[in-house]
Image (spheres, helix red, strand yellow):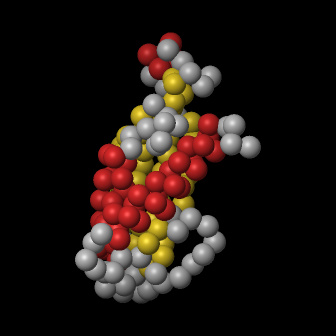
Amino acid sequence: MEDFIELQIISAVSKLLTVKVNEIIGNWNFFFPLVEIGKYNGSNVVNPVISLSSCEQTEKERIIKIDSYSLTITFTVPETPDCELYCYGYSNAFDKALSLDKTLGGIVQCATITGTKYIPPKKPDCGLFWEVIISLRVTTEGRI
């Protein structure tokens, strides 16, 4: 089942989030909800959604047979006094974790953050959610 590169990429990103990002967050000197992948919910964790899709290749990538994917990680953070800080923290921690392992454990050729978007709730102080959406471009070599 792990033969598909798409599953390997999602698994590698999940591992990066639950291991390296949590390790970075754990070194901070204040409470920060940890990242958890799965169905576990609680006030002390956040469950990001990982979405993967293929994206347009450059002409060079087509010639040398490099697949490219667009990956988004969406953190939904319940509104609390520190929720905006949490959004910035998750973005920062993921950026640091990815800079330590751009190949996601050798699964891909390169993973690069292409954008980060912070979305506050439409109505402040209504108990809604903040979101941080991290977009990546992932390339794999010789998988076509």
Whether 25 is drawn above or below 8: the answer is below
Residue 91 quadrant: bottom left
Q: Which residue is drawn at 56% across and 36% down?
A: 54
Q: Is residue 121 toward the left or the right of residue 63 in the image?
A: left
Foreground pick, 41 / 53: 41
- Visible in this render: residue 30? yes
- Visible in this render: residue 115? no
- Percent across and percent down for residue 29 are 25, 77
Foreground pick, 47 / 99: 99
Foreground pick, 108 / 26: 26
- Percent across and percent down for residue 74 are 47, 60
Q: Is residue 37 toward the left or the right of residue 58 in the image?
A: right
Q: Residue at x 42, y 86 (%)?
A: 126
The residue most toward the left is: 29
The residue most toward the right is: 1
Quadrant of image for the N terminus:
top right
Whether 74 is drawn above or below 86: the answer is above
Q: Is residue 86 toward the left or the right of residue 61 in the image?
A: left
Q: Residue at x 40, y 61 (%)?
A: 21
Whether 63 is drawn above or below 140: the answer is above
- Percent across and percent down for residue 72 are 48, 51
- Percent across and percent down for residue 35 are 47, 68
Quadrant of image for the C terminus:
top right
Q: Which residue is drawn at 52% across and 25% down?
A: 141
